[in-house]
Amino acid sequence: MLSKKYIQLFSIVIIVATVYYSFYAQTPSKNYTSTVETEFSTENALVLLKEISKKPHYTGSTEHVVVRNYIVSALEKLGLQVQIQEQVAVNKKWRAATNTRNILARINGSEKGKALLLLSHYDSNPHSSLGASDAGSGVVVILEGIRAFLAKNEVPKNDIIICITDAEELGLLGANAFVNHHPWAKDVGVVLNFEARGSGGPSYLLLETNGGNKKLVEAFKNANTAFPVGNSFMYSIYKMLPNDTDLTVFREDGNIEGFNFAFIGDHFDYHTAQDSFERMDLQSLNHQASYLIAGLNYFANIDLTQLKAHEDDVYFNFPYFGLVFYPFSWVMPIFIGCLIVFFALLFVGFQKKKLTLSGVIKGFIPFKLSLFTSGLLAFFGWKLLLKIYPKYQDILQGFTYNGSYYIVFFVALSIAIFFWFYKRFFKKEKTQDLLIAPLTFWILINGGIVFYLQGAGFFSIPVILTLIVLAVYIFSANTKNNTLFFTFLTIPILFIFSPFIVMFPVGLGLKMLVISSAFTILILGLLLPIFQSYRNNKNIGNLFLLIAGMAFISASINSSYSTERKLPNSMLYVLDAAKNEAFWASYNSKTDEFTEQFLGKNPTIGSYDANTSASKYKTNIQLHSKAPIINLQKPSINIVTDTLIGNNRKIVLQISSNRNANKVELLTKTPIQFKAFKVNNEALKIDATSKLAFEVKNGTIMSYFLTQEHELIELEFLVAKQQKFDMDVLEIKFDLLSNPFIKMKQRSEVMMPMPFVLNDATVIKTNITF
């Protein structure tokens, strides 16, 4: 018989080991090092990645052509016939257009069924991202995976289409061009899309389907991937958020479903100059490879016409079982069953005097105080940190370089708060009385899930396991020796739910620390029977308070910028041709050594104009100052047609750059309803309800990214004849750092261009008079 001391030690070891393994098990721990020609090689993939990510290669750049030619050459070396699909594409949602050039190849199968399509994109984000992770990693995983597959000399049943799209970063334009214009699109049965939203971390599975996920989940399970990471809670949240990938276009425009595989760790590297070969996490690359290897071998040889379904499955990953799933239709019965068992245990517990009304009521006090105190501290604590360190707001991804320390700080602080509030109750109240409060909260959460978020149906697992613990307390005469049994019951809870504590702030920004704190308290509440059995449990709170302090100190030490944690900053030169005045403008909230040489020590707060270029996170210009007039060659703007047709007004507008600009953006200061809209003869679809192509209240109408010299942009649109116009044209060239008329000191080695905003550009602003 083990002594209490050893039981407590084993219990602690099990809990710590489970939490550690819940993160460790998410990614492969070894490279694909085989030298066998028919197997995937990480080393081969890295050779390709190093070439692709040497320089920024956004659509329209010189390096973009170099990378495209390199990928074409790599495919041709595999004996594949490669075609470049050149097509103008327009995205209504992102108000973007360009002339795309997709890289396509096809492996013929033995049967004439639907094809498997392997998807990633080769353009990097304008204008400074090196694109190693996003999405060079996806491209090289596909290239190396196809090389190993072809080396087997096996003919797949299904055709395999390789689609490396262009202009994904501009608004999914390459995917739009393929789905809506290429004849192969109608052949596609399922898509495997490889993406990245950071430079590390586990790769998550996210499904895209217009119907139910049941057949896709079952197929993915049968593919037998080595390290599946995904769950239907993420799937349900993803469907509710305005997130898009190339695969979204396949689903929305082509009714083609598939799988997204994307890693989101080290989010601060996303779309920056730090998205480099050197910073790419090998485990993340290998995780993508594990999906590709299993998916390619499986989906190339099954009937892809059988993947559509009306029903959805709840699913989650678990060690040795892979993907565990069951129908959405079970969610309600499971909840009702848990509710019946819960009330039955309450009734029997009060009858047998195992539960006391006063004890149950008192049990809500420490739990609610822990939950709300930790949540409030996380919410307002992060806001306070933004005041203390305003430079954090310049990291537009929302996750700072020292963000992991802040996660540890707030989670450890939440644990300390939990034990601080419970320390007096552990001695005075029964464990079963204290357990009712967290169990009630979990049941209420599951009640909401039944009606609003059935994908999170597996949240019933903690309820079921805790009901077993409560039943032991109600029906067992002796519960003093059940610590290890209760600890083993918590293993599924800790393994499934611990990663959520980190996933939310990593994926959605540190503003989500409040969710991390709440999850921490909710999980700890279910572990009350274990903690109450520990000797000196109050010391646990002190230990985690110490950990919180150490994490906060570490975060403070690592709050400064360095060559490995670069300061993002921005600068624009804007020439307002109509007013004959010029400005320096920055999206930074404060000046630094680089921006001060333009803005001076006391720049004007706010923007030089209300009508400025769009940015991904609606970031506005924060500082500006007057600038000298530089003789920049203005774009040619020609109103070809401005005529009335019945009650409508048709306008054809031509714009061309005289200085080889990168982008032209059309903006409006007044609301406009476009009944029809064409960009270089590519028409937007008319909405069936509103009968409009689209409507703009103010701001960006359309951004066109130029891909060749002397490229002509022709905009044709139809509006009501009484429509009033007040339009501006912004012509943008990424030449601020190389412009011979602008003298400056270049960024230091601890700085980099800010992502997601217009940057390092000279801008000519012109008003259009109709």
Image (spheres, rainbow, N blue to C red):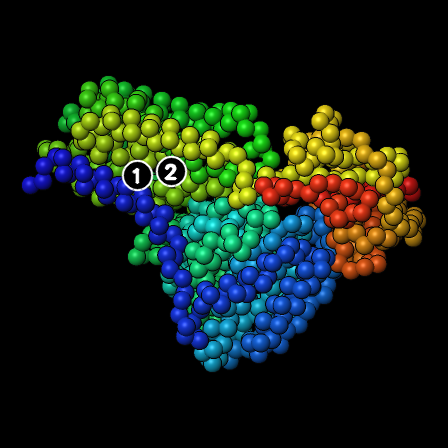
Pinpoint residue 651: horizontal percent, then vertical percent: 88, 49
In the rendered image, which quarter is residue 418 located in? top left
Q: Residue at image x 35%, y 57%?
A: 322
Q: Which residue is mark 2?
A: 446
Q: Which residue is mark 1?
A: 463
Q: Secondary structure at mark 2?
A: helix
Residue 188 in sight here: yes
Query: Dot 1, crowdedness within 10 Å: few (<14), some or many (≥20)?
Result: many
Q: Residue at image x 40%, y 23%?
A: 373
Task: Give the amino acid at mark 1.
Answer: Val
Q: Secondary structure at mark 1?
A: helix
Pinpoint residue 667: horizontal percent, then vertical percent: 79, 41
Pinpoint residue 626: horizontal percent, then vertical percent: 80, 31
Closest to the observer: 462 or 97?
Answer: 97
Q: Which mark sits nearer the N-terminus, 2 or 1?
A: 2
The image shows a total of numbered marks equal to 2
How far apart marks 2 and 1 lie (CA) works out to 9 Å
Q: Residue at image x 78%, y 60%?
A: 708
In the rendered image, which quarter is residue 530 located in? top left
